[in-house]
Amino acid sequence: MIKVGIVGTTGYAGEELVRLLLMHKEVQIQWYGSQSYIDKKYYEVYGNMFGLTEDICRADDLAEMAKQVDVIFTATPQGFLASVLTEEILSRVKIIDLSADFRIKDISVYESWYQISHKAPQFVEEAVYGLCELNREAVKTARLVANPGCYPTCSFLAVYPLAKAGMIHMSTLIIDAKSGVSGAGRGAKTANLYCEVNENIKAYGVASHRHTPEIEEQLAIVSGEKTVLNFTPHLVPMNRGILITAYASLKRKPDGSLPGQEEILEIYRTCYEKEYFVRVLEEGVCPETRWVEGSNFVDVAVKTDSRTGRVIMMGAMDNLVKGAAGQAVQNMNLMFGLPETEGLRLVPLFP
Amino acid sequence: MIKVGIVGTTGYAGEELVRLLLMHKEVQIQWYGSQSYIDKKYYEVYGNMFGLTEDICRADDLAEMAKQVDVIFTATPQGFLASVLTEEILSRVKIIDLSADFRIKDISVYESWYQISHKAPQFVEEAVYGLCELNREAVKTARLVANPGCYPTCSFLAVYPLAKAGMIHMSTLIIDAKSGVSGAGRGAKTANLYCEVNENIKAYGVASHRHTPEIEEQLAIVSGEKTVLNFTPHLVPMNRGILITAYASLKRKPDGSLPGQEEILEIYRTCYEKEYFVRVLEEGVCPETRWVEGSNFVDVAVKTDSRTGRVIMMGAMDNLVKGAAGQAVQNMNLMFGLPETEGLRLVPLFP
Amino acid sequence: MIKVGIVGTTGYAGEELVRLLLMHKEVQIQWYGSQSYIDKKYYEVYGNMFGLTEDICRADDLAEMAKQVDVIFTATPQGFLASVLTEEILSRVKIIDLSADFRIKDISVYESWYQISHKAPQFVEEAVYGLCELNREAVKTARLVANPGCYPTCSFLAVYPLAKAGMIHMSTLIIDAKSGVSGAGRGAKTANLYCEVNENIKAYGVASHRHTPEIEEQLAIVSGEKTVLNFTPHLVPMNRGILITAYASLKRKPDGSLPGQEEILEIYRTCYEKEYFVRVLEEGVCPETRWVEGSNFVDVAVKTDSRTGRVIMMGAMDNLVKGAAGQAVQNMNLMFGLPETEGLRLVPLFP
Amino acid sequence: MIKVGIVGTTGYAGEELVRLLLMHKEVQIQWYGSQSYIDKKYYEVYGNMFGLTEDICRADDLAEMAKQVDVIFTATPQGFLASVLTEEILSRVKIIDLSADFRIKDISVYESWYQISHKAPQFVEEAVYGLCELNREAVKTARLVANPGCYPTCSFLAVYPLAKAGMIHMSTLIIDAKSGVSGAGRGAKTANLYCEVNENIKAYGVASHRHTPEIEEQLAIVSGEKTVLNFTPHLVPMNRGILITAYASLKRKPDGSLPGQEEILEIYRTCYEKEYFVRVLEEGVCPETRWVEGSNFVDVAVKTDSRTGRVIMMGAMDNLVKGAAGQAVQNMNLMFGLPETEGLRLVPLFP
């Protein structure tokens, strides 16, 4: 049994980790960390857990936790892990960080977008960007995995095949994203009250959202091109789900023609043919968040438009699963030599 | 492996059965029955199933199905099973019927409330009312199980401990019920369109809902008293969930006093202490549908009111799981000698 | 033009007052009071008001406000008005209080349910309970109107005709209520976050909600009977709307028979035949909150059940309009000699 | 009093027309046309209208209607008006058509996108595209007004100032749109059931939506450039509202620099300074559909991104008001010499 500690169990991503790990047969949760609910029973914070665990929330003490568990998940605000991480801790346990602290290799980019000074730059190089479909082998041997952001995971997987294949002009890439409200966390803010979010849609963080450089860095790596893009997230009145609609101009072939729909779709199929969690939808089908809810799947589709010479790349995902806790478990499975899908063969819940 | 056939796979209850059975390790679905989508791939009807099954919808042919499978689930409109069931079929397979055809022992009551003439009254006596917590032993040896209705399951389990203990005046019982929209099925009706249901709550079937006699019959059996009650369902803008708020006058003790909160709560605890799927909530906690979503749990709570001499009995449940497909699988487990919780140890999905 | 001041403009009821008063042709809002947003432009707090008012939020200074306006609306937490009200203020302006401070005549009942000591008991006797359909004449000459609570308004109007006519046993009355989330206010609480409320229904304040004694007091007055009842509110995932489902046993006639549906319905029709804002629905139609949204209507319906000898009384209303701001404007119209419906002939918004 | 006939009163746009016209003091509705509910009372179809009208639905007989009314609104499927319109009818009444029949001047474009042969091409030239902010003067004298589509209205008004000013490369324009469900109409389709739409977001009509050529034609006119763009609509789980997020590359100035945020914002302010219904939001504020619900406002905002050289243009609107019935009433006001805002000074309803 793998002994697990979770820092930040009482946020939504932390709670989703608990849900997944309680159903994972190789795992035992040893430490339910929480800043706000210390000494409370976990099921008093999340009533769905009543009868499933009697455990009590304990302080987020990383050093002590490191002595008692095999792996730590940190589902915490930016800056937390970087401020407490030490070589001693890393020598004892593996860490899967759900925050942004170790996702971006260029520290100045991180510091500029997050407006925070990085407290542990010495571990940035070592950290593996835990997008399993991209970095599977590196994850297996990592001590420190930077679990990707929700928007970056879905954006990247929707665009990846064409970026890698060099089929699109990276400078024309625009990503219009839509997310359910759980992505905003469980903090008690007026803006996230039911009546403020319900019956509404809005854009936010326009031209300034912090997931932008993370997406750019990863796409630059796989495309081999400098990538500067527009990323616009929107808040949608639903609990879970992210939908990505991405636009880019297709590169013309030597003969001046545009690649066709079948050719483009085939690139997606080939790229993901061995991936269990990425489902390339059939011709004419668009991703919908309802079809992935509660599961670790990412559904992707692609549509060429000969009128404009663009391609529309789409992806749908559950932001709390593949966008956070599910991908973290997928990384854990890789790091501990388990089958990658262990505990994650969940059928999406509908309706 | 138990071979399973499902009649009516393309309704919401049928689809939930597929979800649960795909994650059940002792089961293989052999026949995806459907009236409306014959020859379509199942994942074309329910996109969440893409990549999980390649099966095709086949006609709802009960006799042929009976030759190929070990157990048949019928998730069909009232009257269907009664109109096709024969001794020959029953001698080949076990049947778990999610419709109302065999739930009510008094055929005249059935015919009067459902406005339908019963086509197979000869099997009514044999059919076991599949409320596992009540009829566990009888289910184990049954050929034909009448899976309870969604409202009756939650209503019954909320009231059962006090009805059985003879603590309430059964003639004062009022059940005010609230349900999510999936209970209304997938039929294309104007009344169930998004814009008609969203931002709205209404009562329906007031003093005439067909689940009334089912609840009355079961409560009469366990209380030993004639039970005629008011049952009022309401439609709530959410996908899943049933909440029951039931009211009854407490019987006074010989000394004229009313039983206290602790005494009443203890009756619930004792009644359900061995039940995995019924969670008696802690003092002061009320059931909420969000805490059971996607799981087979029923959460119950009770509150006495010394001002009025009444007790308020509450229950929350996922109408598609414990209220339909989950309870059907629970019955199947019992009928095939599997652990009752096999495939049903699902952690509720929140948010 | 009537000059208006509002204390508590930045809560939901306050904002609804602004909406209604901006469309009221006899009124000018002079003072947008707010504790939390002093010196902010009102449209920065509520973006719907952009372009409609340039006014700035000012402190909730009742004494100063009294010098500048003709009428003050207090949309504030319990206890506020009682703690600042003086004879001098009341001699200058009329006050319509949307809090509970002056609704309950029995001060010990108020203090016991609200757990607060009443700071201005000398005005309780004078205050008129502003349920216009009940106390129209008294409102016209009042200095201080206690605007009814949302649940009490809808509960009272649903039950009133039969209570007044002496047709029901008041001791058997049970009121099961359902409300949208705006009733919970705009305070930043975890429990009211989108993800906590969405896809959920729950009861709260079971056997202890503070609107109970208000309903009891008013029904006791009109029925002439002591009234102790069960009132159970539920939180429904929608912005606006209250639905009441009330149950009581019908009194039998001298000949032992129960009154019939037509007879009961006729009592409702007669009772409300002159009321513009109370709509008695046609036989067989149940109230739905969607049909009154944004308007000052209350829809009521009634259904007798000969099986149980009970009657089910139903009402639907917009909690922010007839349940708060709309009724307050209706009271203002009466107090200033305007047509009662002035500014309130709003067609419900659907969908 | 202007006598009004409505063809298609029982769809959502038709019902919204009724709501607005019942509150319009210069209008009387003479004819509630409906195909599906002939001889039913209108309030039986839309319960919000109970007590407000006793009228009965009558057949959609345009010729007869033309004899009895001054203006006809056609809220009908594509092709209906073109198939019945005659010179005789047009000589008797003014017509405001909410369908697409007369919006597109290039008939071959209409026929190609709508897959329908145009039955009344002789009136296309005469018809005025009723985007009031654009064609105010022409509308005043028109006999036949083509009321713009919901997406085109919001898309156009969001992009118009920069298109007209020649500040953007029209060939780079991408419009990502999001709409509430009422835009899909009241037809009983499985895809629009509550459980299918709730908790979901999806794109549809990708690279093929029929509002595309309408947007292109109007933007080409005002920009003077051929305009071929990508338009992608998405379905959002809410009743009302359209949000537009549009992207385009800014043209560089002669000195090679990009125009700045203030300069761009000033263009919007100047363009719309006299428009009551278009609200240019303050710097840093993004449009949200909740702030316009129930009103005829369109909120627009703009954000330049110096990193990518693009501008993000945003707009929010109520699809049933400014996107359909409200704009139709605005057109009617213009055609009959009434103040343009008559009956439309509605304060948005929130929450």
Image (spheres, coloured by chain):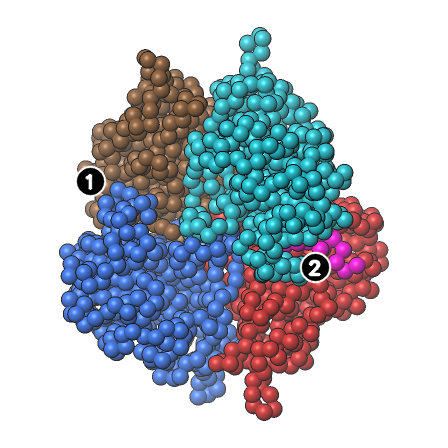
Chain colours: A red, B cyan, C brown, D blue
Mark 2 = which residue?
A: A327
Mark 1 = which residue?
A: C339
Instruction: Specify the amino acid type for callout 1.
Output: Pro
**The stretch drawn in magenta includes residue B58:** no
**The stretch drawn in magenta includes residue A345:** yes
Location of residue C173 by image quarter: top left
CA gap, disc 1 and disc 2: 63 Å
Tally of numbered tags: 2
Location of residue B46 by image quarter: bottom right
What chain is tagged by disc 2?
A
Instruction: Specify the amino acid type for callout 2.
Output: Gln
Quick one: D200 or C107, which is closer to the camera? D200
Question: Taking the image as drawn, is residue A301 in sight?
Answer: yes
- Residue A93 in the image, given as x and y percentages of width and height: 82, 55
- Residues in magenta, as a range: A339-348
What chain is tagged by disc 1?
C
